[in-house]
Image (spheres, rainbow, N blue to C red):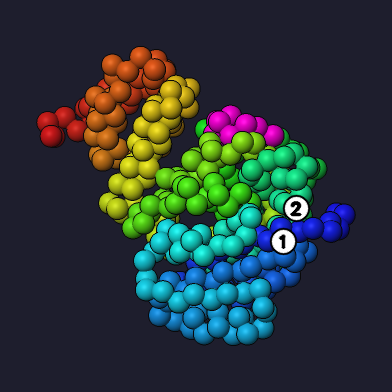
């Protein structure tokens, strides 16, 4: 990539909590970026392990690193704290147990410049170690308006699009759409707003973000709060698009959420589908096929829970 004379400051926000085994790997990947005009904000979210000390050591080693120690408030709260202290024109989020390719930020920044976009997205790959290489397929670039990019939330690129990481945003967009504090599935509750409010969004298939798969992560564990929060996120998303009269996105959200609930195939999902059907059955904007799927799911499971209320 060509070296540019003027580089705007880019902020990297890294929430830190109980990641002493992975934090070094993460920060090393950030200080090694080919794009050098960075501020790296390490937000210690009241971590009880050695992570705070590791953060402080890195602050001494690289002048671009700023460390903040705060009381525990969860991932959303830590991200919001970083957003409020961000000085960069652009911002990106990296989780502290993940790591990125050396060209991660430079590549995303050049996509934004080339396509005159507000947001750039790369792909990610799931990893289980720090030795896996970033091998790429042939490059494929797509450019959308912010509204049209939201449609990518409902196809095979869903996971790439919904996560907050692996993206470079204009900072003003993020500051106007903060993360909901105290809730799980904060990405499902926020990313669609960041995309929708972008003038243009450029999407690449290059996998430059390494997502460390931790099966013990709270978002990979079934719990009442987990299920409740993702439901709230989808219903908020549906309301958001409905208020803006984005009927196709509204209908797609309801259809997608219906599929998510039905895929669980348990008693809770059966009753949740019944509630969804009651909520949307008279709405002319909801796809007929979605209502048929709801009815089919209810009829298919009625025998199973016959007599239960």
**Point 39% across, 20% down: residue:** 286
**Point 76% across, 49% down: residue:** 110
Residue 91 visible at all: yes
Q: Position of residue 202 (x, y in %)?
A: 68, 40
For the N terminus, which image quadrant? bottom right
| Range of residues picked out in magenta | 143-153
Q: Which sits in the foreground, 50 or 2?
A: 2
Q: Residues within 10 Å of mark 2 (few under 14, many from 20)?
A: many
Residue 252 shown left or right of residue 268 in the figure: right
Q: Earlier in the sequence, mark 1 or mark 2?
A: 1
Q: Which secondary structure, mark 2?
A: helix
Secondary structure mostly seen in the magenta stretch:
helix
From the image, state whether disc 1 or disc 2 is nearer to you.
2
- Of all residues shown, which one is farthest toward the right? 2
User: Which residue position holds label 1?
Assistant: 101
**Point 37% across, 71% down: residue:** 72
Residue 25 visible at all: no
User: Which residue position holds label 2?
Assistant: 107
* Callouts 1 and 2 close, C-beta under 8 Å: yes
Q: Which sits in the foreground, 269 or 179?
A: 179
**Point 36% across, 66% down: residue:** 73
């Amino acid at each position: 990539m060509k070296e540019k004379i003027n580089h705007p400051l880019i902020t990297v926000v890294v929430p830190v909590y109980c990641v002493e085994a992975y934090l070094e790997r993460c920060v090393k990947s950030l200080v090694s970026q080919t794009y050098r005009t960075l501020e790296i904000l390490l937000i210690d979210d009241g971590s009880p392990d050695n992570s705070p000390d590791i953060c402080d050591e890195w602050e001494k080693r690289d002048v671009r690193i700023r460390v903040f120690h705060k009381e525990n408030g969860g991932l959303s709260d830590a991200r919001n704290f970083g957003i409020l202290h961000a000085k960069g024109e652009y911002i990106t989020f990296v989780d502290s147990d993940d790591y990125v390719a050396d060209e991660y930020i430079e590549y995303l920044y050049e996509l934004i410049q080339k396509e005159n976009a507000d947001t750039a997205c790369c792909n990610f790959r799931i990893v289980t170690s720090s030795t896996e290489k970033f091998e790429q397929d042939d490059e494929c670039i797509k450019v959308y308006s912010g509204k049209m990019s939201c449609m990518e939330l409902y196809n095979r690129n869903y996971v790439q699009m919904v996560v907050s990481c692996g993206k470079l945003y204009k900072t003003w967009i993020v500051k106007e759409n903060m993360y909901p504090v105290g809730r799980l599935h904060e990405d499902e509750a926020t990313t669609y707003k960041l995309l929708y409010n972008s003038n243009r969004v450029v999407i690449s298939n290059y996998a430059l973000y390494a997502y460390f798969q931790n099966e013990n992560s709270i978002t990979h564990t079934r719990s009442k709060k987990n299920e409740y929060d993702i439901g709230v996120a989808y219903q908020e998303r549906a309301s958001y698009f409905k208020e803006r009269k984005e009927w196709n996105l509204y209908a797609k959200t309801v259809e997608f959420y219906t599929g998510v609930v039905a895929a669980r195939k348990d008693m809770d999902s059966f009753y949740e589908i019944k509630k969804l059907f009651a909520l949307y059955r008279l709405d002319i904007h909801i796809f007929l096929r979605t209502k048929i799927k709801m009815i089919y799911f209810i009829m298919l499971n009625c025998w199973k829970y016959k007599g239960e209320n």
